[in-house]
Amino acid sequence: QHPVGYVGRSGNLQEMSSARVCHGSLGNQCDIIRPARIVKLHGGVNPRIIVGLMPSSTPAAVKQHPRTGDSGLAARLGREIEGDVLFDAYSRGRYSTDASIYQLEPVGVVIPKTERDAQIALQIALEEGVAVLPRGGGTSQCGQTVGHALVIDHSKHLNQVVAFDRDARTVCVQPGMVLDRLNAWLKPHGLWYPVDVSTSAQATLGGMAGNN
């Protein structure tokens, strides 16, 4: 509950007998403060609010996936794929964030060098019972590319044009293809991919298809 009330007339000052400030993760820890008041400036605009403040609560401990940094899983992936397998704390930290406010540490990261690498990593994760999280440019502001999972980053190697049909006006690309790069490739053919996003210099087609 907010500790201030609304005053309808300009120039008024309202003193409230008491007010409750609730905090905690469920808003179920409340304190009484006295008094709380609101000042509404002349002309009925730009209200000035005076409230009581509470110290922030201690953040809860962040939980990890039980397989986070699993050396056995990392070793198996390293034996069976050509690309990079990153299970160290530094790499997990880098991949725990994107353009959103969220931060979730992944189990580990795979950067496939070939499409076969991506397929093998997906199959191993399935057999090991670990969730998979494909990642492109990490430009989402809603946290789709962070999670307690095996992150597969397609942006480094899987970013090529696979097939193109000028007459049908279709193109097949790998998921790590960046939008601006695709449009630069299409420009000599008088074509472009008609999606205009603000992060076109980093956003990949795989991420756009998955999230947008």
Image: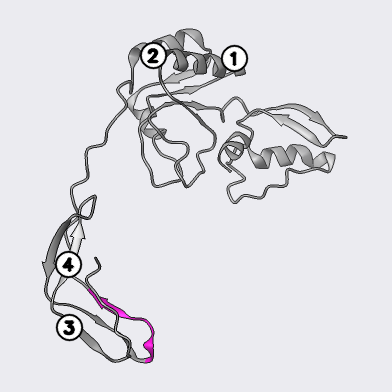
**Residue 158 at x, y percent in the picture:** 61, 25
C-alpha distance separating marks 1 and 4? 60 Å
Amino acid type, residue under disc 3 in the picture? Glu
Amino acid type, residue under disc 2 in the picture? Leu
Tell whether 176 sits left or right of 101. Answer: right
Which residue is labeled 4 in the image? Answer: 20
User: What is the magenta range?
Assistant: 43-50
Counting residues from the N terminus, which is met first, the one under dot 2 or under dot 1? 2
Q: Does dot 3 land on a helix, a strand or a loop?
A: strand
C-alpha distance separating marks 3 and 1? 70 Å
Q: What label does residue 15 carry, if any?
A: 3
Counting residues from the N terminus, which is met first, the one under dot 3 or under dot 4? 3
Residue at x-position 79% and y-position 42%:
187
Q: Is residue 31 above or below residue 211?
A: below
Q: Is residue 8 above or below residue 111?
A: below
Which residue is labeled 1 in the image? Answer: 116
Looking at the rendering, which quadrant does residue 27 occupy? bottom left
Q: Does dot 4 land on a helix, a strand or a loop?
A: strand
Amino acid type, residue under disc 1 in the picture? Arg
Amino acid type, residue under disc 4 in the picture? Arg
Q: What label does residue 73 carry, if any?
A: 2
Please state which of residues 182 and 24 is positioned toward the viewer in this rendering: 24
Q: Does dot 1 land on a helix, a strand or a loop?
A: helix
Please state which of residues 59 and 35 is positioned toward the viewer in this rendering: 35
